[in-house]
Amino acid sequence: MDLASSRPAPTAVQKPRTAVLRFSVAAMQSPQDTFASYSRLFERLEPKLEVRIELVQRRTYQEVNELLASGQLDAALVCTGGYVDLERHQPGAVEVIAVPVVHGRTTYQSYVIVPADSTARELSDLAGKRFAFTDDLSLSGFAYPSHLVRELHGEAATFFGSVTFTHSHDRSIEAVAKGVVDGAAVDSLVYDELARTSPHVRTMTRVIHRSPPYGVAPVVVSTRLRPEQRAALRDALLHLHDDPEARVALALVGFDRFVPPEADLYAAASALVVGRR
């Protein structure tokens, strides 16, 4: 009898499974640009949290909200309008843990933009024209311009000749630059960054209206995530700028740093959305 053959096979050393944090970035940019922009930032966060961050992308803000509410997402950088909508319909489903500071501010605006050679000087000049929204939960790309239209002539569906939803602000900007639409409402932060880095955006589009300031897109966590995990992510984000390499990653997505949210930061956005319903 071969005793060696009866011995149990050596067991491979099992490495501890790395925890996964499922994180989404709302489609304010196209998926390709979002992945490229945020990958380096997540690489700096992972060792601080001792997790692997899985970027989960969805086409619409509503899809991201549903994943957060059901606990299928742990955290997300959500658009302001999406956050306000989630708080209205699923109060307590998420907690705001940090907000980005962009050029020293925690606010942004809705811009109405047109082709550079357009004769339009204000929104009323776009009556009967082709117009692009981003997402029906977007504050800057839908709620605010819809509010403006109602003050003028009623509803967007009858005010504009046609409307389209692009599902990202950079796509809306490109649609205006290429003359596919006659106007669009976009996030000021996305527009200003593209105008800085893409010469054709500066030369082929212009802004005809700027909204009042609203609270910038926040980082939220699902309240289904354990409290200690929420606290760890909050602390990592709030101190991320202390890491020199992380500061470079923050700059690549246009952020100075993350700070705690002010108590009334989203009050104006909430009032606008509630008044629109």
Image (tube, rainbow, N blue to C red):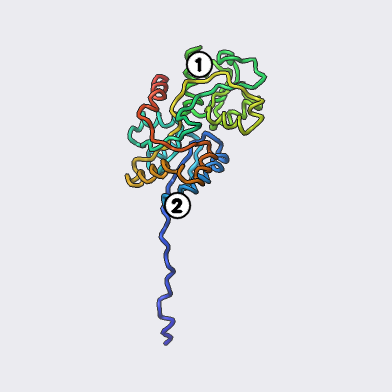
Q: Residue at left 42%, top 67%?
A: 13
Q: Residue at left 38%, top 42%?
A: 234
Q: Where is residue 15 in the image (x, y as percent from the top left)?
A: 42, 62
Which mark, residue 219? none
Q: Residue at left 62%, top 34%?
A: 197
- Where residue 258 sits, quadrant-wise, is top left
Where is the C terminus found, in terms of image quarters? top left
Q: Do the residues labelled 2 and 1 touch (CB within 8 Å)?
A: no
Question: How many numbered marks have been drawn onto this rendered protein structure?
Answer: 2
In-front residue for pair 123/207 = 207
- Quick one: which residue is furthest to the bottom in this view? 1
Q: Position of residue 169 (x, y in %)?
A: 55, 30
* Amino acid at circle 1: Val
* Amino acid at circle 2: Pro
Q: What element carries label 2?
A: helix
Using a 10 Å C-alpha cutoff, classify the residue at mark 2 as few (fewer than 14 neighbours), some (14 to 19) or many (20 or more): few
- Where residue 119 sits, quadrant-wise, is top right
Which mark, residue 149? 1
60 relative to 267, above or below: below
**Cα–Cα gap, marks 2 and 1:** 48 Å
Which mark, residue 47? 2
